[in-house]
Amino acid sequence: MEPFFLRYRNLLVLLVILLAQIIGLAMQIRRPDISRGSLDQRDSAGVRLIRLWAEMLVSPPERLIHNSREGVGNLWSNYIELRHVRQQNEDLQKTIDRLRLEQAALLEDAHQGERLQALMGFQQKYIYTTVAAQAIGSSGSEQSRVFYIDKGSSDGLKPDMAVITADGIVGKVRDVFPHSAQVLAINDLTSGAGVILETTRIRGILRGNADGQLMIVGIMADQRIQPGEHVLTAGGDLIFPRGLPVGVVQKVVSDPDRDSFIDVYIKPAANLYRLDEVLVITSTEPRFSSQDQQDMATSESLKGAEAATNGNQAVQDQLKASQIMEERLPGLTNSNAPTVTAVANPAERQAGTAQNQANPPQPPAPKLLAARHPDQFSPPAEAQTVPGAEPAPAPPTTERRNP
């Protein structure tokens, strides 16, 4: 290194002097700010050249370092760190599918709970004895409208029992097995039920057609039958109790085979295509709750008390009437007749009747009757003596003298 400095010593000294001069000038001279208005403001607010040169010298490496760091960070976060994102997405998608299935199951359970709650409420309020059952299968044929329930003969089911829901009638039990039963729906071709129109009180027979529609046949043409009228069971078929909802009149058409008859199409009250829970009427004997039975007993006791009060009042009225008659007809009064008193209640009346039967009243002596009612047809008093009684004195006789 010494030969180099010795050889270029003058040049190096010159360069150092020039560099020092340039640095000195850069520290003294300011770069004018063109954003200022006047020249004085530009000179006073400018940036020193040395500072400007230093910034121009340092900025490119700093910018390069910053961009390199951002590139490396993006490479790490957007590629290297996301290597397992696809697997995570697949796991999340599986979780979402599972949660959707669980949500659908919970929603179905909630709907089933609502249906069961409504069915149980109807069962508790219904006057006849019913058995709740669940539909477990169908016939699998469009021509046969039957389905199966999970209750059978072991639960008390018998053929021809009515099957209903809280909305209306569904059908009747056709075949019974130990733990299941087959139900024939009311929209089957072979089904039937006696119905009556609620407003017009016209009776007919409910049947199903080949398309599974409900219709009432055997009705004479009547202008009073209009769509929207409710249809109820008539109770004449001995299967469905009277007054159960069947449906609503949908339309009225003429019978193609008989001119004077019409066919009334019915919209069923129960959804026959989505049956889940049903009720089977096992007994048509009315059943009452404990509160109803208590109310009925109270009503019967009140009726009995009212009848007893009315009986006592009738006896008192009769006694009062007899007393009035005795006052008006004193000649009919019998002094030997027993005194009759009013009876307060039926028990005392029965006791008085038994006592009268044990000690019947004795009839009055004939002589008293003859004394009260003397006439020319009555026998003499001596002939009417009672055994054991003293003979009555003979009446005084008067002689009739001739003038």
Image (spheres, grey):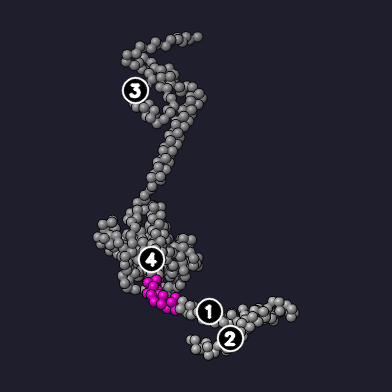
Disc 2 secondary structure class: helix
Q: Point out residue 73 in the picture as x, y percentages from the top left corner.
A: 46, 76
Q: How far apart are marks 1 and 4 (CA)?
A: 56 Å
Position of 337 relative to 183 (above/below): above
> Of callouts 1 and 4, which one flags the residue occurring earlier in the amino acid sequence?
1
Farthest-out residue, bottom: 7
Residue 273 appears in the picture as rendered: no
Q: Magenta residues?
A: 74-93
> Of callouts 2 and 1, which one flags the residue occurring earlier in the amino acid sequence?
2
Q: Which residue does the image show at 51% across and 89% down from the upper left?
A: 4
* Of residues 131 and 339, the one drawn nearer to the viewer in this rendering: 131
Which residue bears the numbered disc 3? 359
- Answer whether labels 2 and 1 touch (C-beta < 8 Å): no
Which residue bears the numbered disc 2? 13
Occupied quadrant, residue 207: bottom left
At label 1, the amino acid type is Glu
At label 2, the amino acid type is Val
> Of callouts 3 and 2, which one flags the residue occurring earlier in the amino acid sequence?
2
At label 4, the amino acid type is Glu
Q: How far apart are marks 4 and 3 (CA)?
A: 90 Å
Disc 3 secondary structure class: loop
Residue 138 magenta-highlighted: no
